[in-house]
Image: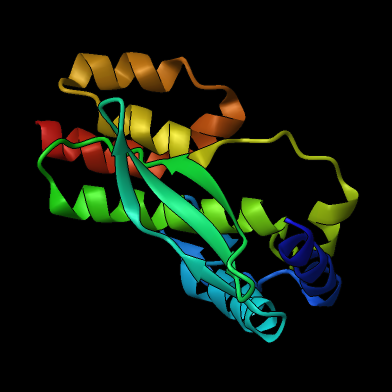
Amino acid sequence: MKNIATALVKAQSEMSNPKKGNTNPFFKSKYADLNAVREAVIPILNENGITVLQPLVHVDGKNFVNTILLHESGEMMDSFTEIVYSKINDAQAQGSGITYARRYGLQSFVCVGADDDDGNKASTPQPAIDLLRLETRLNACKSLQELANTYKSFTPAEQKITVLLKDKLKTELK
């Protein structure tokens, strides 16, 4: 583990956070997509003799992305991120879950965030909101009543950022 640890320390000292270049249409928020994360970290990891692999694995009845950092010496480190998606047998939902798991798994493993492009948000503490969790809960609703109850259980801030998705799902459930 000495070679990969040394290379990872050097790589992290050279990394910068990925840029938030995409906008989530439901939440009207900016985010760094998987490509932005990859562009920010993989070239620097590669320059330090580390390659990234992200195969899908199935463990104990659950699906995961296994993010592997493989050093040219043969040493490796890996981390599992569960793939979460709301609609069974829906390729688009599963693909979205895989992309989320790859992005968050890689970001977390190499310890990068995403550049804050709004100085006011950076200087004003904001409560942490797990958008994926909220979206998953709403997408899992099978009836209008369940959707209404789930939405009502959200905080006002959570309701504000999920209102468009809630309205879209409401139309689909009618």
Vertical order, 14 against 130 (above or below): below
Q: Residue at x 15, y 20 (%)?
A: 143
Query: Residue 122 placed where, x, y %?
Result: 84, 54
Q: Quadrant of the C terminus?
A: top left
Q: Nearer the viewer, residue 52 or 143?
A: 52
Image-based side of 50 in relation to 94, left or right? right
Image-based side of 134 in relation to 62, left or right? right
**Residue extending furthest right?**
123
Image-based side of 58 in relation to 110, left or right? left
Q: Residue at x 77, y 39 (%)?
A: 126
Quarter of the figure with residue 44: bottom right
Q: Quadrant of the N terminus?
A: bottom right
Quarter of the figure with residue 162: top left
Q: Nearer the viewer, residue 116 or 120?
A: 116
Q: Nearer the viewer, residue 18 or 105?
A: 105
**What colouring method underlies this structural image?**
rainbow
**Residue extending furthest front?**
73
Q: Is residue 61 visible?
A: yes
Q: Residue at x 62, y 62 (%)?
A: 75
